Image (cartoon, helix red, strand yellow):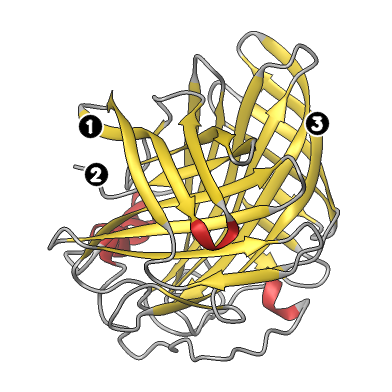
Amino acid sequence: MNVKTILLCLVPVFAQAQGFAGLGSGADGFAIPQPDPQFSFPADHGAHPDFRIEWWYLTANLKDADGTDYGLQWTLFRSAMAPQTQEGWDDPQLWMGHAAVTTPDDHFVTERLARGGIGQAGVVADPFAAWIDDWRFDGIDVGTLSATGPDFGYDMQLTASGPFVRQGKKGYSVKSASGQASYYYSQPFYDIAGTLHLPQGEIAVTGTAWLDREWSSQPLSGDQTGWDWFSLSFDDGARMMGFRLRQTDGADYTSATWIAPDGTPTPYEDGSLRATPLEVSQVAGRDMPTRWRLELPAQGVDVTVQAINTQAWMTTSVPYWEGPVTIDGTQSGTGYLEMTGYE
């Protein structure tokens, strides 16, 4: 990749705009999510270039034969400078990939940047394929997943054991009191198995994975500085998604979805979820809450969420914390935590 490509990819990331990473800036002629979306599959597994930002975000909780916990991340981001596509270097669609593996003692991370229009990165809806360079995610119900970095890699197989789940109000996920929103659905029922390629050798692992699909043009309000996002897989087969968006005035905006073992979602609006930091760790020179109490009283949830590795810092163009967690309390299980906007 040449320097011009890298700079063009980073323009929207480092632009001086509102909200965390510019996600609160104006929509600038892009499409805006509307209530009561009518998703169409498999088409909506693909890209939506008339929206400004979009991601295919997969995390996995894994164990090896000895019971050691691992985490895995594979993410493809699309960011647009204009709501259109075209062939060649003038295409305004920009792509960024993040891959990571977390162990109890180490956190491996790498990043890829690409320009649209030249085949280096993209997404095809049917049959589903998402890629950036040699990283690939092929197949949406039964598929394969791979990525490589300077000191790690993985090759995995995925099988969905439940339905896609619409987050928020039938897929319309409100993010602020002023009404910013995204289209958002998940596949939280993947079984996953494969091989981690780490400095100590190849490790066979199995576990569960969670895919988030989200697109918008202004998902945050200008006074929101970052978020704490949880995807929790309980041992009884239920799932829960929840997030807390932090504001400059010290207030929070929260949302949650309870997902029954059969995939039936129950959405909960602002104020229903309580997310309380319990323990802070020093991470990359800043204080990060790596142990939490999560409460969703309407479902009888009162759990403690603990990072498997407190140092799961993503040293990417926009740095953030992302790693696997364990769950104890009224429910037990495993999950993933993402935290952004901590200075």
Label 3 sits on residue: 194
| Marks 1 and 3, the one that precedes in the sequence | 3
Mark 1 to mark 3 CA distance (whole Å): 34 Å
Residue 225 visible to the viewer: yes
- The amino acid marked with disc number 1 is Asp
- The amino acid marked with disc number 3 is Gly
Q: Position of residue 112 (x, y in %)?
A: 49, 45
| Marks 2 and 3, the one that precedes in the sequence | 3
> Looking at the rendering, which quadrant does residue 17 occupy?
bottom left
Taking the spot 55% from the left edge, 34% from the top edge, the residue there is 324
Asked whether disc 2 touches disc 1, contact meaning CB atoms under 8 Å apart, the reply is yes
Label 1 sits on residue: 287
Mark 1 neighbour density, 10 Å: few (under 14) some (14–19) many (20 or more)? few
Q: Position of residue 116 (x, y in %)?
A: 52, 66
Asked whether disc 2 touches disc 3, contact meaning CB atoms under 8 Å apart, the reply is no
Label 2 sits on residue: 342
Taking the spot 44% from the left edge, 89% from the top edge, the residue there is 31
> Looking at the rendering, which quadrant does residue 46 occupy?
bottom right
| Secondary structure under the numbered disc 2 in the rendered image | loop
| Secondary structure under the numbered disc 1 in the rendered image | strand
Q: Nearer the viewer, residue 339 or 318?
A: 339
Q: Position of residue 148 (x, y in %)?
A: 62, 33
